[in-house]
Image (cartoon, helix red, strand yellow):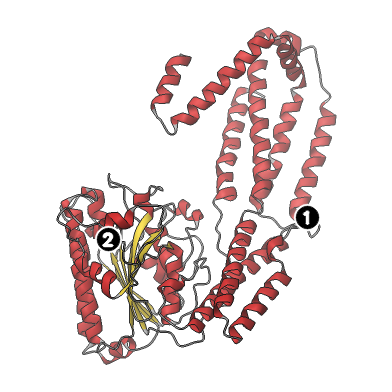
């Protein structure tokens, strides 16, 4: 192979290696074709107000200052007198879009969205907004449109400020949150004189969503411990208090409104987010109003962290959740179907309702997740030969039927705790099964790419050895019959292609699985060079060979350590130079 052709082949092979990462690790977890499921019992709330303070850390909201005062006195009072609270645990990537998807749609980031810069989802998904009767939202043009875009019908309304307002160099970004609060006030004032809007606002199953970007912007510009960030928390607290008072007044204090305040992600001390530091993954969750349990006083609580003591909240029961659990909580409160792709588990500890309602809610949650599992299994079964298909053994069809049957019997006999326990078991098994089928082809594809990578690396080594003039003379004496390799590898390629075709697998699978064929064909064609290499290695002294291995191992370890300790890379380069 001439050098130009070798370079082109190298570029193409490495492009395949790069693209394969997305098919192996960055495939969408979403499936479609499920039936919506909702609780048939009357919901505790007619409407929900969701506040999402973008970039708000849990400790920034809950911590008292040096004088023992809170930056959010209204929300602190809610914890002590009206509602339930805890920490919402987010997942990587701790970015705004993935966080809102988890909160509102109930599933963790579709990692294939990385190819869109986390701005939109390549695959359509359901959300709590889509399932609502009406949703009105105010906030950033980067967040609101993606939920309106995926909604069926015309019932998700967005009110965004201009993108130019999102100035990360601004002295004070609280104006973004002030804009949202002012717009909401104007909206309710307008509704008093607009019969059509007034009528819509008195429907059931409606949501008001306030996206507050000021904290995130101030955190980036001034850092979370800055005066600007803390002042922004006070502004949010005051704004939430005003909106709550106005909403309750508009509805005549009917007690049918539920309120939730949380955040999409936190922020590091140096004003960044996206990774997995606790300051980025720990966000606040405060819920109160219709259907929410009142504060519970306790004498002691068992948590691995020391936050309760630091925040002076030891006496108020803390209820932690995973971020995706908030979506089923909202669905349960206003009685809408759980988002179809939600993997959240309903946090019953937040609900102030009957044992029957909780049991029925958990059953709905379990059936909704189980249906995703069934669809995922059917999809995978269609693209796998029957004798090769390996089902998820922990949740067979008979096991599903048995658990659901027992659960319904327990509910009929008012054994609600037992039914809830079975539902949790079914949810855990279904989630494990979803993960199993989502990664079903990962080993198969990974093995193909690994074979290609090893083969290509070996081929490059052989080309380097072949270019050594001292070995050219010996190599030229040996010839290998090409026909044998051509027919043999061609037959292997045809068999692989036929195997993939029968299973109706994506065209990219053909590239990944067929790539090892030409790569290893090229390697074995260089049998004379391999023979020279083996002869050379056999003549190397054991001590020298062991020394090479030690140097190689040390070099690899230095590279690994450099990911965590940058200075080790400098040390390694100095040593090996």
The answer to whether residue 34 shows anywhere in this view is no
Of 465 and 432, the residue lying toward us: 432
The disc placed on residue 213 is 2
In this view, 17 is above or below 549: below
Q: Which mark is residue 8?
A: none
- Judged from the image, the secondary structure of the residue bearing numbered disc 2 is loop
| Residue 17 percent across, percent down from the top left | 59, 39
- Disc 1 is placed on an element classified as loop
- Residues 313 and 195: in front is 313
Locate residue 215: give its quadrant.
bottom left
Crowding near the residue tagged with mark 2, few <14, some 14–19, many ≥20 C-alpha atoms within 10 Å: many
Figure check: 144 above or below 490: below
Q: Left or right? Give the position of 497 relative to 406.
A: right
Residue 450, given in percent of the width and then of the height, sits at: 65, 37
Instruction: Please give the residue where the numbered disc 1 appears in the rendered image.
Output: 388
Residue at left 58%, top 81%?
Answer: 415
- Residue 256 location, x and y as percent? 33, 85
Report the side of 366 relative to 301 (left or right).
Answer: right
């Amino acid at each position: 192979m001439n050098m130009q052709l070798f370079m082109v082949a190298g570029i193409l092979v490495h492009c395949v290696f790069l693209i394969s990462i997305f098919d192996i690790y960055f495939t969408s977890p979403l499936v479609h074709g499920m039936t919506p499921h909702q609780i048939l019992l009357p919901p505790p709330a007619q409407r929900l107000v969701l506040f999402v303070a973008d970039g708000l850390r849990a400790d920034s909201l809950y911590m008292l200052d040096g004088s023992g005062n809170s930056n959010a006195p209204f929300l602190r009072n809610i914890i002590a007198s009206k509602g339930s609270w805890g920490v919402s645990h987010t997942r990587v990537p701790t970015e705004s879009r993935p966080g809102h998807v988890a909160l509102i749609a109930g599933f963790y980031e579709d990692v294939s969205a990385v190819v869109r810069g986390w701005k939109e989802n390549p695959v359509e998904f359901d959300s709590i907004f889509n399932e609502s009767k009406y949703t009105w939202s105010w906030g950033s043009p980067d967040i609101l449109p993606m939920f309106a875009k995926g909604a069926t019908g015309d019932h998700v309304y967005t009110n965004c400020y201009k993108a130019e307002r999102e100035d990360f160099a601004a002295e004070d970004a609280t104006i973004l949150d002030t804009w949202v609060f002012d717009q909401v006030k104007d909206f309710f004032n307008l509704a008093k004189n607009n019969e059509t809007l007034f009528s819509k606002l008195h429907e059931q199953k409606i949501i008001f969503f306030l996206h507050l970007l000021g904290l995130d912007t101030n955190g980036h510009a001034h850092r979370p411990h800055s005066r600007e960030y803390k002042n922004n928390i006070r502004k949010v607290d005051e704004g939430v208090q005003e909106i709550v008072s106005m909403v309750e007044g508009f509805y005549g204090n009917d007690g049918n409104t539920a309120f939730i305040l949380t955040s999409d992600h936190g922020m590091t001390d140096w004003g960044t987010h996206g990774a997995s530091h606790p300051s980025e993954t720990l966000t606040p969750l405060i819920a109160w109003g219709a259907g929410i349990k009142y504060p519970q006083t306790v004498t002691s609580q068992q948590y691995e962290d020391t936050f309760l003591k630091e925040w002076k909240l030891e006496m108020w029961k803390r209820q932690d959740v995973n971020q995706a659990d908030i979506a089923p909580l909202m669905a349960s409160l206003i009685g809408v179907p759980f988002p179809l792709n939600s993997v959240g588990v309903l946090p019953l500890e937040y609900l102030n309702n009957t044992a029957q309602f909780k049991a029925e809610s958990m059953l709905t949650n379990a059936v909704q997740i189980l249906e995703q599992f069934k669809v995922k299994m059917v999809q995978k079964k269609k693209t796998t030969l029957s004798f090769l298909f390996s089902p998820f053994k922990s949740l067979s069809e008979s096991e599903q039927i048995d658990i659901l049957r027992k659960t319904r019997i327990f509910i009929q006999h008012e054994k609600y705790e037992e039914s809830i326990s079975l539902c949790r078991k079914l949810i855990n098994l279904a989630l494990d099964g979803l993960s199993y089928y989502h990664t079903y082809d990962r080993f198969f594809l990974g093995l193909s790419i690994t074979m290609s990578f090893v083969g290509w690396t070996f081929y490059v080594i052989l080309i380097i050895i072949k270019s050594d003039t001292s070995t050219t003379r010996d190599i030229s004496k040996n010839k290998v019959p090409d026909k044998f390799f051509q027919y043999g590898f061609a037959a292997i390629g045809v068999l692989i292609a036929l195997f993939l075709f029968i299973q109706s697998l994506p065209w990219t699978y053909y590239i990944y699985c067929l790539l090892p064929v030409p790569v290893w064909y090229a390697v074995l064609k260089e049998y004379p060079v391999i023979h020279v290499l083996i002869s050379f290695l056999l003549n190397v002294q054991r001590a020298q060979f062991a020394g090479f291995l030690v140097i190689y191992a040390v070099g690899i370890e230095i590279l690994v350590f450099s990911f965590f300790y940058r200075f080790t890379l400098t040390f390694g380069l100095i040593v090996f130079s």
